[in-house]
Image (spheres, rainbow, N blue to C red):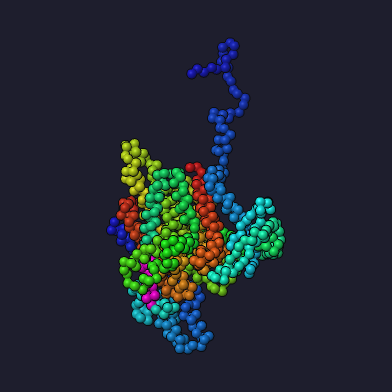
Amino acid sequence: MTFRAHSTVDGKLDHFVSRESFDPHSVERMTAEQERYYMASQWQMMWWKFLRHRLAVASGIVLAVFYLSILISEFLAPYHLHSRDAKHIFAPPQELHLFHEDEFVGPFVYGLSYRLNMENLKREYTSDPDLVQPIRFFCSGDTYEFWGLFEASLHLMCPAEGGTLYLLGTDRLGRDMLSRIVYGTRISLTVGLIGISISFLLGLFFGGVSGYFGGWWDTLTQRLIEIIRSFPELPLWMALSAALPVTWSPTLIYFGITIILGLIDWTGLARAVRGKILALREEDFATAAQLMGASSSRIIGRHLIPSFMSHLIASATLSIPSMILGETALSFLGLGLRPPITSWGVLLNEAQNINVVALYPWLMLPVVPVIIVVLTLNFFGDGLRDAADPYR
Amino acid sequence: MFTYFVHRVLIMIPTLLAISVLIFIIIQLPPGDYLSNQIQELKSQGDTAALAKVEFLRHQYGLDRPLVEQYAVWLGVWPGPNGFSGLLQGDLGYSFEFDLPVTDVVGDRLLLSFIVSFATIVFTWVVSFPIGVYSATHQYSIGDHSLTFLGFIGLATPNFLLALVLIYFANVTFGTSIGGLMDPRYLDQPWSWAKFVSVLEHLWIPVIVIGTSGTAGMIRRLRANLLDELQKQYVVTGRAKGLPPLRLLIKYPLRVSLNPFISDIGNLLPQVISGAAIVSVVLSLPTTGPMLVHALQSQDQYLAGSFLMFLSLLTVIGMFLSDVALAALDPRIRLGEQVVR
């Protein structure tokens, strides 16, 4: 390779200095895309990585819809939580139609006509093709107290005047299943959230202390965790919730149950925290902080925990489903929440009987949102966990 | 190996002691006890004869003594009214509701609980092992995706509802009697071949139902472990040397990834016992579950306490067995105690 210097006409080399400032990156110019990637913050990279996990993104959207719905349950439910219809007890789900006799009428249901079969004393409902009951939207129906704050009667959809709208059927008191499921979402989903917050704090505290200080603190915590883990979870939950005083109001019971769920669940998180801290406290940045005189709590809280927070959030998400299922199981057994507080588990309590499967299978419908939420939370948590380590 | 074994047995003792303390606290948590509730009721009815009997029982079972003493008597390290007679001596206490010693109330239940749990674990292993191996060796194939999805559904469906639906269909299609662990005709008969067959006919539903949730987790873990192993150098070397694929798989990576499969029994067992508790309520199986729920509700404290203790004992022993099996399999764990780090 030959090097050609700048030369003047008379053959003498002259000294050349470019007037422009030197740009060290000029040697290897990054494309805009690379630039964006290398300059991105850790959280931004997690976000990108998360977006690539399509199942997790879809699950996140479904979950967002569920969680947003609890803000406006009263508006979304066509009926009030407690409104009864003595004329329609155990009514089957009404089918939604769009066309009546090949003519477009918009969404409507056929009215139900009721007959008691005297032979087997079975309630028989048939849909009456003459009774076209178009659904009304943004209409006024049962009055409710919005979050117990003010009275209102606006609903997303209501039955036609004098008609019925039982898209998921009714229960033994003639209460609309759809409305009850919508209201139940509020309780079932918040049980998981409150429970996980408690177990998150406990896990962070115990795991942090045992990992950072080691020694007999560590031994003690590890023994405690081992003991709690060797308990079968559900019987322990059952025993503890049976210990809640009968005199408590349903709201207090609700908080009692969430606390019980959280109290037992923290062990897994504490182990994860401990493992991470054990590894991280040997890192240079922790030593540096220590040499500069930072206190233990500052090192744990400011330096160690943030560096594995993303992992923690992911594993916390993955343990919400077990809480939701736990609450459902407890309420199903009658040891959990009590009416009038309505969760999916409380609704399923009505489906305890084998007759229900045979005669009124729609009473088992509250299990559908349970499955959806548990599944999506699992996928969402998986996505988060993968994204938590974006450099891999 | 022997030192490890002894060490592991010694650890179990304080664990079980701590568990018994916790259980005792839990069953004492509700205000009052079964007998004082009973006394209230009898007082309101003015039944003095029965009242005297209840007072007698209260004294007999030491319910009028301080809690610490009650615990010591329950455990069997302190002389109660009948001398040293507690859990350590095999005396499970007295069920106030049934007016019988707990041992008599319990009867076959502990054994049947054990059978159901054991069958479930075998089921979980038998099902998840081939599926896990298939999913790992055929990663991202249609079979892998659909099996994983099926596992997830099993994980997400509440056990009790699955139990209801299955028993209904079993009744409609096979004519299996609803509820119980055997046909009603065999209930009070001694064990015979026909009774055994009847138990098997009924056993599959709870076993499948309880097994589904554990199976999903097991499959995922086996799959993940095996996938990690399959990418390692020694597998590539083996393949390059021309080992037949099946032989290669079984000989090295499968054996390594089997390790967590066994240690997982520690996680699986509490899960199985939890699942069994609720499923047996739904299916009204004659196991510990339904009676535990009932005892908890009526504050029949010794009955509830003994059941909880039995279930925990089952878990602790299961964990112990899995640790020992693991140590026997893996020299790293067995010798780990002597290694200086």
* Percent position of residue B261, x then y: 38, 53
Rendered position, B23 above or below B262: below
For image coordinates 39% across by 68% down, the residue present is B183
* Figure quadrant of residue B305: bottom left
Q: Which residues are magenta?
A: B101-115
In the image, residue B108 lies in the stretch drawn in magenta: yes
Front residue of A205/A254: it is A254
* Percent position of residue A80, x then y: 65, 64
* Percent position of residue A44, x then y: 57, 44
* Figure quadrant of residue A251: bottom right
Q: Is residue A392 visible?
A: yes
Front residue of A68/A208: it is A68
In the image, residue B151 lies in the stretch drawn in magenta: no
For image coordinates 58% across by 20% down, the residue present is A16
For image coordinates 57% across by 35% down, the residue present is A33
* Percent position of residue A215, x then y: 42, 58
